[in-house]
Amino acid sequence: MIDLLVLGAGLSGLVAALRAAEEGRRVKVIAKGMGAHHWNAGTIDVLGYLAGDEQPVEAPWTAMARLEDDHPYQLIERDAARAALTWFQTLTARCGLGYAGADGERNMLLPSPAGAWRPVFLAPAAQAGGEADAGRPMLIVGLEGMRDFYPHFIVRNLTAAGQPARAATLPWSVVSAARDRNSVQLAALLDEPAAQQRLVSALKLVAQPGERIGLPAILGLHRHTEVMAALQRELKCPVFEIPTLPPSVPGIRLTTALRHELERRGVRVEVGMEVIGFHAEGDAIQWVETATSARPLRHRAAAYLLATGGVLGGGFSSDPGGRFWETIFDLPLTVPQDRTQWFRPLFLDPQGQPAFRGGVSVDSSFQPVDADGRPVYANLWAAGGALAHADPILERSLEGIAIVTGVAAADAIVRERDFEGVRG
Amino acid sequence: MNKISTDILVIGGGSTGTGVAWDAALRGFRVVLVEKRDLTHGTTGRYHGLLHSGGRYVVKDPQSAIECIEENRILRRTHTHCIEDTSGFFVVTPEDEGDYPDRFRAACAKTGIPCEEIPLKEAFRREPLLNPRINRVFEVPDGSADSFLATHATVQAARQAGAQILIYHEVVGLLTEGGEGDRRVTGARVRDAVSGEETVIEAAMTINASGAWAGQIAATAGIPVRVIPGKGVMVAVNHRLVNTVINRCKMPADGDILVPVHTVAIIGTTDERVTDPELLPIEPWEVQLMLDEGDKLVPGMSKARILRAWAGVRPLYQEGYAGDSRDATRALALLDHQQRDGVSGFLTITGGKWTTFRLMAQTTMDKACAQLGVERACRTADTPVPGTEQGYYWLGHRLHEVEEHHLQGDLVCECELVTRAMIEQAAQNNPTVTLDDLRRDVRLGMGPCQGGFCTFRAAGILAEGGEGRGARDEEEAAVPSATSEWEVAYMQSPKHNIGANGARRSNRRFDNPNLLLRDFLQERWRGLTPVLWGRQLKQERLDELIYLSVMNVDHLPPDDDTSPLTEFWQFDTTPGATAHKEGDEL
């Protein structure tokens, strides 16, 4: 029997699995799908906005004090949370995918694909080069006909926000001969030196001295670091990436790096495994069952970590009758069980939508608890998007919560579980 | 102030108003049509898409049924490409007891509606998802209609005959002259909703075709018109569950028609009398009722993914009527204000249904001619609108064209197969103020993701102002395209929108991409919230990830711009509150 079975291959699940594996535990990850980081910007947003506040958060660690008492960040000592981010930075650097921040205290402001400033705590080195700085003008370059990146749109809004910037468009054929290519396919094409060379030649025609060049986040899929180095060397100017509409190349690079690291440590990540049942005796989960093509498969472990995410990750489902439920263990959720209370009339309401604030309540050890605050199962923990009392997309805390709570839950499991005793 | 002089002023850019403009222009009148928002923005753009055979009304209202079958035959000739020849079933479920089916068949025979009872085996072969407990099936010539395309095609026909169409022009008030007993309407003062500029339009005859808003228009001249606004809720399912229009064979009631329209199926409707045509909240019970009733036609429909819910408001009219809107007549109502109120130069046309819009226009213009003392015959029944040569609409036409011309790389909306060039052409050639206008033009954002991907792309394309056109190879560029005038009738056709238009006249009246984007997201949200659960809720959360997390569109640089839609988004923000305009009395 393994020590820890992680349910979910999103950021929180992968991070927790790595953390527990580093502590010598035997870990396996099973997941239905690939996790939301194939969709996000690939940055680590720790806390970008406080609900109802128009201005972005400058210093996330300080601003956390203003979050509700039961927010996931309030369950963790601030130093432990900082340490988790530092650990993540070290880890990704070791994987060859460096993440950079401002100074460990403040958020950076990086351009979004709509040209709005995104408050980001850590970003892939390639994106960090796009930090707001009126003294360093930008040239935003797109490809003609690329449907997921619009340099004129970005420049319009950057300029309105005081960032000197201009737009340019290169022929599509610089990167690809065929028309029907998404950003992931374009990134793969740019892994090839010949394509990089064509891009460099075209950029030399449009770039002016003193500019830094912002490109869609397609600068290499598997050889990103080399591609970035080659472009900056040849162009003799800073080059940075701006995220595109999904699928997200930076998110896929991160997933790939984390999964390589897990493989290196002998942790299997099995995707395509939907949990269809579980069995508990007393307050202990005995096994979970997944659907496979041949027959249902039972997975036994001493400890289980629920990292299936919220509505987006598939951790929760809902029906027209107003029921909202956690899809594996049917854990109690804090979402109002009344559909008329789920949404506000405005899509971009600064207070967010109530349906997305609810989730699984946990104690300070990240064990899901019932209405009386008692753990539902003695060997179950939860982390990431499934946690209650936060709307990670509204707060821009999705990746921060995933990493900090993933690490904290893994540490709690390692600390509090006497695995040998359970096995005996 | 600008001044325009014309013979006929038409108020309202729905099917009826555009039909009147078309009819009047073909009769040789000078015509101006004003619409306060986009064409089809009112009831026409919010209906279920059923081209009636008349079967639905044949027992209850035979006169309406006769009008339907006659118009059904005419529209198949004049608006062929806007119609899918789906045919229609009237099905008897175990719940539909009594002698209604036999009365139905007899009434069809009497009114001349072709109706054939078909073997159950054949019915289930053609529609395998139908409730297996259905015990009788009658086939009638129902169809499925695209009211957006049909209205645009009617407008193009009207323009070609000389009509002038002014959208985003709101009537401030009717102009009147004369005193008690000898009053006449001489036109209207209108305001451009984008520029705020006002224009006086003088007309020999003013025709109020503003549907549910007809009372408000007439009131500006002190004429009382009490329209019975009957709200109808419709729900779109993400699959085409049936390929035939399915009607319950019983007295018309709630949720008893299922219409295949393009790639989806629409179940409708309810009928609730409301007070304000701008205020159409969709209650959970109304959606639930549609799903429950839908299950009786196609079991399991309620478990399908629901894309969107919306409400339209029927402009029913019955002089002196005070009952439920469900029982109010569907017949057309032409109000002769000369006879009724002693006010000349003014007619109100309301009631009716989409299927009879041409007849409504004809009736109206016959009366107008009589009052103007001229004899000019109606020509609409024998004059096909542009695009009819394409033949009936068929489901695969866009996919076929995209594949034939290798346009996969240019798709901006993968759900509805909308290419970049279709958006650029529509934005250049149709007066475009919001992305929702483009939705009505080319079906942008109407599919399962409800604008999740294409909203950003369309805003980005419009921000480029046509500069970022995709590279296309020689072969593609050589495909014949509409070179001279942009053919509205082909606006939904990928292959007719390849390459740049020779005339680069821009019709975009509003080009702040931030507002375009936010308005469209809000518009989509309005139709989503009544049906957000399960997989559609998951999709919605993905849209939040994209627009909040990745794009940060709730924190774009501040600007003072407002769009004509901005005032519609002033809300009470408590959960479950109803969207309403500021200052409205609830």
Image (spheres, coloured by chain):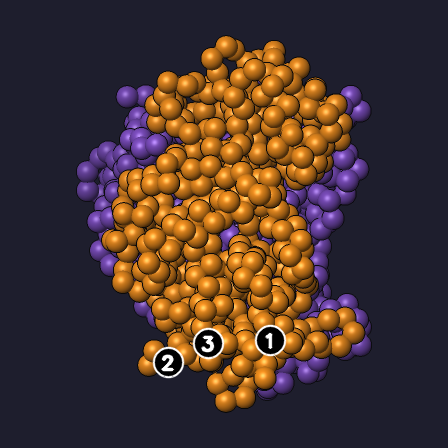
Chain colours: A orange, B purple
The answer to whether residue B234 is above or below residue A248 is below
**Residue plotted at (24% across, 59% down):** B586
Whether residue B373 appears in this view of the structure is: no
The answer to whether residue B367 is above or below residue B527 is above
The amino acid at mark 2 is Arg
- The residue tagged 3 is A331
Could you say which is closer to the camera, residue B501 or residue B457?
B457
Mark 2 element type: loop
- The residue tagged 1 is A301
> If you read the primary sequence from the N terminus, does the residue marked by circle 1 or circle 3 appear first?
1
**Label disc, if present, on residue A374 of the rendered structure:** 2
Rendered-image quadrant of the N terminus of chain B: top left
The amino acid at mark 1 is Ala
**Residue plotted at (34% across, 39% down):** A106
Picture quadrant of residue B277: bottom left
Q: Position of residue A288 (x, y in %)?
A: 61, 77
